[in-house]
Amino acid sequence: MGARLPTIESFPALRAWQRKALVEYLRRRSEDFLAVATPGAGKTTFALRIAAELLADGTVEAVTVVAPTEHLKTQWASAAARIGIQLDAAFRNADLHSSADFHGAVVTYAQVGMAPQVHRRRTMTRRTLVILDEIHHAGDSRSWGDGVKAAFEPAVRRLMLTGTPFRSDDNPIPFVTYERGGEGLLRSRADSVYGYSDALTDGVVRPVIFLAYSGETRWRTSAGDELAARLGEPMTQDLIAQAWRTALDPAGDWMPQVLRAADARLQVLRAGGMTDAAGLVIATDQQSARSYARLIERVTGEKAVVVLSDDQGASDRIAAFSVSEQRWMVAVRMVSEGVDIPRLAVGVYATSASTPLFFAQAIGRFVRARRPGETASVFLPSVPHLLGLASEMEAERDHVLGEPKRREGFDDDLLERAQRAEQASGELEKRFEALSATAELDQVIFDGASFGTAAQAGTPEEEEYLGLPGLLTADQVATLLNKRQAEQLAAQRRRRQAGGEVVAAPQPVARPLSAAERRVTLRRQLNALVAAHHHRTGLPHGKIHAELRRRCGGPPSAQATIEQLEERIATVQSL
């Protein structure tokens, strides 16, 4: 006797976007369907509801889920079991077939790529629905893509899911429909799209507050030269890479100061209503992850959970952490995509990875809303490319084939070379030596706008931002950030005036502002004008900034040049 069919009546209520997408799916009844939904929106629930519908009406007899990682196999099987669909997460290629106790199996893209003929036979044996989770992984390599296509071409139905931007490459993703656009390039077409901005409006995801930390960094090159740079200031990409690496060095002061600030923010969230709120540090490599865990214990007095992808029991540690009261977890890539820990509310982006895909996956770990008013806070280095990605949280991108090859912002290959410790010729010494780094809150980014002026770590000015209430709507976050910035500027003016009264002397001639100071001043002016336009029109800050970028061109304001900021100020004044 086979596995019992799931009961549709017992299925949990769907969100509005899930209902709309389900109706569209059932109306079309096409073989292939691509659903793009922001992390935390509920893609798994949507896909399992479709599986339940197709099993119940006899359209399919079996379900195969293809996931990116071993941990996600377990997560899919557990979610399916809760609504009566039994999936074999322990299936191996050598098994050839699943037991009759199961409706199907969960496998990885790597499994399929290694033995596509095994999965093709399984697919041909029974009418099968194939759910391809994070379908962009089928474009990772030609072997994976070819394997997925060969294995699942005989499927009766294929449902493709993704929640992050597609890679920019020329590997077509199997079963995705491409259409030629006006520019002559082939662009992927989704059948259902539910973006971050829509989810934020519906209260499905949390507002994300980015706290960007700059600071002075010093390091020694292989030639013995000592260099110094300030994170966030314009410089060449190799200098950015080395300053970034210096900041992330566990032996410096930058990471302890940022971890102390992140833990302070976490305690505010816990005291303010999110009693089980947890934090996650995303590290570049395993050695750094272990070092950061030791720093967390030193800063907070509590041990952190360390999750490394090649450690046995990593999935069990993630599962245990998700239901525990422990405050901090440190990981490399194990939790970058799809892993569901809803209580994660504070993140520290302490990794050199800077592609839009990885950034979106990482931030997606913090956005899942459980109740109205919960916010997420992510601490990150004040690196121009990261600031741009933080400002473009709402960006939705299709997969484009044949696009001219160009780097998306930061050169990851160059950064990887700069991050790698190489041995000098014939010597057991590193070509790069981090000397020191200090942290300073540079700006707060929310809804595409930046707020605040520089504040040293551990000062009352920094505490004003770390102490923002944890339970706020998106509009309340923007209002409070505007208020904090206004108070910060007023306090600075009062300090300058008080200083002028002590020394009875003529006011000195104002010194010329540096480029960095001019940019800060112009950003504040632009944000104030955008806020005023928001109050007049009711348009979200992010949409106003996006319109200014459309009219004037250029990157987000965190990366914009002085000239671009001045042009946007003139434009918003004319709106």
Image (spheres, rainbow, N blue to C red):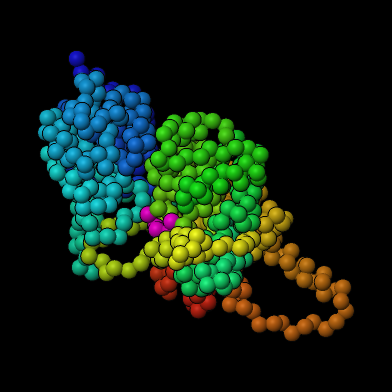
Q: Residue at x 29, y 68 (%)?
A: 405
Which quadrant of the rendered structure holds the N terminus?
top left
Looking at the magenta stretch, what is its main secondary structure?
loop
Out of 488 and 381, give the one closest to the viewer.
381
Task: From the top left corner, tell me how far across and down residue 309 is, in percent.
Answer: 41, 41
- The span picked out in magenta is 353-357
Q: Is residue 301 visible?
A: yes
Task: From the top left corner, tell me how far across and down residue 169 is, in percent.
Answer: 27, 60
Q: Residue at x 42, y 61 (%)?
A: 416
Out of 351 and 225, give the one closest to the viewer.
225
Residue 541 to residue 363: above or below: below
Query: Which residue of the protein is positioned furthest toward the front in this rendering?
Result: 426
Q: Which quadrant of the structure image shows residue 478? A: bottom right
Q: Which quadrant of the structure image shows residue 482? A: bottom right
Residue 453 falls left or right of residue 568: right
Q: Which quadrant of the structure image shows residue 273? A: top right
Residue 505 to residue 273: above or below: below
Out of 49 and 342, give the one closest to the viewer.
342
Task: From the top left corner, tell me how far across and down residue 74 is, in percent.
Answer: 35, 31
